[in-house]
């Protein structure tokens, strides 16, 4: 069975979709130019395909003017072609993953066999494998393991108590992060946002201060992704304040990641603090003293790039 997007888009370009959105508001090209801050020539170029419309900063500016979501211009989620076997396999688990996300916090009602089968060391091994698949962007293989893994870890959170339950919630946080990246890479942005909310929720249940702060990194990314730069900055500043003076390798690494997220947010939002945050991240990388976690200084192209994670630095951006 071929899996298709549940919000199909015709075979259009970003510019053609921009034109549809503009006309939906009954705006002229001149009106969109005035509202977005771009020239009339630029708007015409975007719509007619003579100018590239693929930079996130441009798309976000147009979305703010049109009061629409970026995916309405980019045409996500993407539907894999019938002949794309790997794409079809990757998309096959979207519904099951989303169902598991929707059921978070609800009683799992495990069978006796499920409850008896809860094995934390085995779950830790399986979650580590899922994280490895996530890091290698192995979407089809992720699709084959995530639905059952989500169920099994949710059951563990229900049946275990005390330290065991807190450990299980830490595993659930990791699996939700895997689900978030899986959905994001398939263009299921709304579902990925739902997964981010679950990451925040499950991290709180771990009662681990660093895990809770780390979850805010993803929350900041959600606001950055829709151009709400002030909200993203508030979340980042709050996390850095909570970290205080980082001392452990985990704290140093986390602080560096937040400073790079802040630099990216400043660059895309037209702020003036990107350089300062980059310098902070550089100092933290030197303090960390681990070449595997060091920072290769990103340039402006990195900060304005729209793909994530950032591929020109070792921190996660």
Image: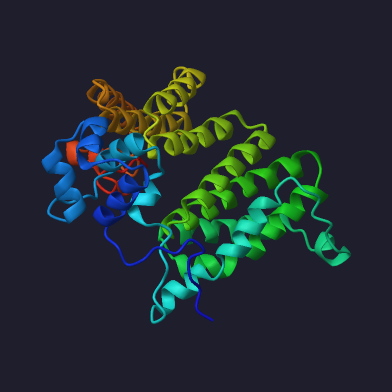
Q: Nearer the viewer, residue 237 or 229?
A: 229
**How far across and down, in percent of the image, does residue 182 sit?**
48, 58
Q: Is residue 286 left or right of residue 147?
A: left
Residue 245 position (above or below residue 205): above
x and y percent of residue 83 in the render?
39, 82
In the image, 297 versus 6, the foreground residue is: 6
The x, y position of residue 14, in whole percent, is 28, 55
Quarter of the figure with the C terminus: top left
Q: Is residue 279 above or below residue 106?
A: above
Q: Is residue 81 left or right of residue 181?
A: left
Q: Quadrant of residue 8?
A: bottom left
Could one spot residue 308 in this view of the protein?
Answer: no
Residue 250 at x, y percent in the picture: 47, 34
Q: Residue at x 51, y 20 (%)?
A: 242
**Residue sitting nearer the eye, 76 or 67:** 67
Give left or right: position of 16 versus 190: left
Which residue is pictured at 42% across the width and 75% down the height?
Answer: 86
Q: How is the image coloured?
A: rainbow
- Figure quadrant of the N terminus: bottom right
Q: Residue furthest right?
A: 112
* Total numbered labels: 0
The answer, for residue 271, to whether it is visible in the render is yes
- In the image, residue 52 sits, relative to residue 130, either above or below, namely above
Question: At 14% from the left edge and 39% from the top edge, which residue is drawn?
Answer: 40
Q: Quadrant of residue 268?
A: top left
Residue beneath the point at 39% across and 40% down: 225
In which quarter of the view is residue 284 placed?
top left
């Amino acid at each position: 069975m071929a899996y298709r997007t549940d919000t199909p888009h015709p075979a259009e370009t970003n510019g053609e979709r921009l034109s549809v959105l503009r006309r939906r508001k009954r705006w002229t090209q001149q009106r969109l130019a005035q509202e977005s801050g771009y020239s009339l020539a630029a708007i015409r170029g975007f719509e007619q395909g003579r100018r590239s419309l693929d930079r996130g900063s441009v798309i976000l500016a147009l979305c703010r003017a049109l009061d629409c979501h970026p995916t309405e211009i980019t045409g996500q989620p993407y539907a894999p072609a019938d002949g794309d076997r790997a794409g079809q396999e990757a998309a096959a688990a979207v519904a099951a993953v989303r169902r598991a996300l929707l059921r978070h916090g609800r009683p799992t009602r495990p069978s006796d066999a499920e409850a008896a089968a809860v094995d934390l060391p085995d779950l830790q091994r399986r979650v580590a494998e899922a994280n490895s698949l996530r890091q290698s962007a192995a979407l089809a293989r992720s699709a084959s393991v995530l639905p059952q893994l989500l169920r099994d870890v949710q059951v563990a959170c229900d049946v275990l108590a005390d330290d065991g339950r807190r450990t299980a919630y830490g595993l659930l946080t990791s699996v939700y992060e895997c689900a978030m990246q899986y959905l994001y890479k398939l263009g299921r942005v709304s579902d990925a946002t739902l997964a981010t909310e679950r990451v925040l929720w499950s991290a709180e249940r771990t009662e681990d201060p660093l895990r809770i702060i780390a979850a805010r990194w993803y929350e900041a990314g959600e606001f950055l992704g829709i151009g709400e730069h002030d909200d993203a900055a508030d979340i980042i500043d709050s996390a850095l304040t909570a970290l205080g003076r980082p001392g452990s390798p985990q704290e140093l690494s986390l602080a560096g990641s937040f400073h790079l997220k802040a630099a990216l947010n400043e660059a895309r939002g037209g702020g003036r603090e990107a350089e300062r945050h980059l310098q902070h991240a550089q100092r933290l990388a030197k303090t960390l003293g681990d070449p595997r976690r060091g920072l290769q200084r990103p340039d402006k192209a990195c900060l304005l790039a729209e793909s994530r994670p950032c591929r020109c630095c070792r921190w996660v951006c």
